[in-house]
Image: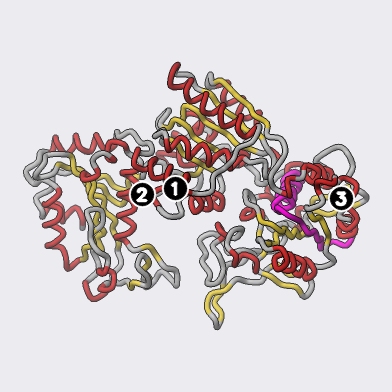
Amino acid sequence: MLLADLADAGLGHVEVLLEHRLPHSPKRVDAVICGTHPRTGEPSYVLVELKQWSSAELVAYDLVRVPGYGADTLLHPVEQVRAYCQYLIDSTPALATRPHLVHGIAYLHNAQESGIASLKQHAPSEHGRLFTLEDRAELIEHLRAVLDREGSRTAALASADDFLNFHHAPSKPLLNLAAKEIQEREQFILLDEQKVAYEIVMRALHKARAASTKTVVVVLGGPGSGKSAIALSLVGELARSGRPVHHATGSSAFTNTMRKIAGRRNRRVQGLFKYFNNYTAAEPRELDVLICDEAHRIRETSVNRYTRREVRERAGRQIDELIDVASVPVFLLDENQIVRPGEMGSLDEITAAAEARGCELEVVHLHGQFRCGGSTAFDTWVARLLGLEPLPPLPWSQLALPLDDEFVVISAESPQAMESWLLMKQAEHGGTARMAAGYCWPWSDPIMADSGKCLVEDVVIGDWKRPWNAKPDKRVPDAPESYYWASDERGFGQVGCIYTAQGFEYDWAGVIFGPDFVRRDGRWVARRGHSHDPAVKKAGELQFAGLIRNTYKVLLTRGMRGVCLYSTDEETQAFLAEMAR
């Protein structure tokens, strides 16, 4: 349909790029029309979002509901193509200085006016206009206004070549905006090794620009040691300096929360926060600095089941892609937080990859922590409790120092008692409280009830029942999206899993040990048959035990002011009660 419309508009000579992938993103534009502008002779690019909808209803300014797509709401197509245009401009310095070269349209080529009337309320702009089957004449007129009918095939091809060969990096307008956003939030004060890590990155960047060297920086630190504070401080400073910088993680929950924190007032800033698998098609040194937060979640490859064949064929190791894309790749990691098979971010792996590429290496160890009341004794207690250290476990009262008095460690006799304790702490002292558990129960999709869509109470312990947090991309009224379970006050009513708790913190933590990890004869036993995590269950015997152990280490170290422990297993519960006294 679109190609026929171009021919009827006298634009048969233009170049059309189909399913064009946006830079450093999995998102694809249905079509990009490349030609020249009829008045200026400059290149002209039209991004097209094609929809086969015959009807749709506006339910909010940016949200629509489409028959046949269930109860889920979708983004308004004009807002979708407008965001694509802005993202492309922000990611392409050559377009940031000439944003007028980019145009956007949403084309509902099967729809008539009566079927989508409410969608027309969206005000049109150069980056977003809506056309339907009945608007075909207006569409042709608009295309002729931004694409030259008298232009040559050669000029259109040159325009397309320029488009395909653009250098991609955060543009200066975007960096200025990000600097303002991050600067206006609460300032981070970096202490001791945190400041050392920050200065090493800045020094490595200066060295890279002065002598074309490449330095890989690794920052090792446990939970709450300030790794993310370093990351955001670097993003803010580099953005203020106009340096191309990205922040990337392997966690959708963590990346979405970082986007919300750092770009809460402007969606454009959110584009600086990426995933590790966004760099399969990146050019070497597209960025000055790439900050890889939660780098223990790096995987062998960025390829997954959705990867297109041509990308799959040329894809290499993920760690190599992350090193190649920046002059200074920075890896922030905790090797004891690897909780899934295939996660391979470690100092040894990064060191080997850096040496193989002839890079210099700088390693910084962060000591101490700012979570768990700043208690280094609690770190030691957890490591000994779980067998991560050779020394035997000891009760908290025997390890706690006078400075640790404000951090609370207790056990609960039941999940009901745990929940009551958390509610009491919230009421008495304020702050946030969450319950999390090992992945020992099924995790169902939401169901429809008389009151609407709701979560299923999958976590069942005796007569106590609670749902898991919402699944990714499964929106449920009165429950936060999975990304925000740890930060949204509505998250208390659900039990969090490792994938929504990792990387976050809350004041009061409740941890439920499930039957996948129990004490027997004075040692821990990991039991595969009691795990409901499909990925972890595939691991080998030794790896499975390590992943389960790391899972509970992560869950135990989320609390800022206190933690409450409970096990569904009687022998394990007796052990935890003894260790928590």
Q: Kindly identify the amino acid type of the residue bearing the numbered disc 1.
A: Glu
Q: What residue is at 65 percent from the left and 32 percent from the top?
A: 193
Residue in the foreground of this view, choosing between 493 and 150: 493
If you read the primary sequence from the N terminus, does the residue marked by circle 3 or circle 1 appear first?
1
Q: What residue is at 9 percent from the left and 50 percent from the top?
A: 10
Split into 4 quadrants, where in the image is the N terminus?
bottom left
- Please give the range of residues in magenta: 544-571
Disc 2 from disc 3: Cα separation: 53 Å
Few, some or many residues within 10 Å of mark 2 (<14, 14–19, 20+): some
Please name the residue that numbered disc 3 is placed on.
Answer: 396
Split into 4 quadrants, where in the image is the C terminus?
bottom right
Q: Kindly identify the amino acid type of the residue bearing the numbered disc 3.
A: Trp
Q: Kindly identify the amino acid type of the residue bearing the numbered disc 2.
A: Arg
Q: Secondary structure at mark 2?
A: strand
Q: Are marks 3 and 1 in contact (CB under 8 Å)?
A: no
Please name the residue that numbered disc 1 is placed on.
Answer: 181
If you read the primary sequence from the N terminus, does the residue marked by circle 2 or circle 3 appear first?
2
- Answer yes or no: is residue 313 visible: no
Few, some or many residues within 10 Å of mark 3 (<14, 14–19, 20+): many
Residue in the foreground of this view, choosing between 553 and 504: 504
- 2 or 3: mark nearer the eye: 3
Q: Are marks 1 and 2 in contact (CB under 8 Å)?
A: no
- 1 or 2: mark nearer the eye: 1
- Answer yes or no: is residue 575 visible: yes
Please name the residue that numbered disc 2 is placed on.
Answer: 28
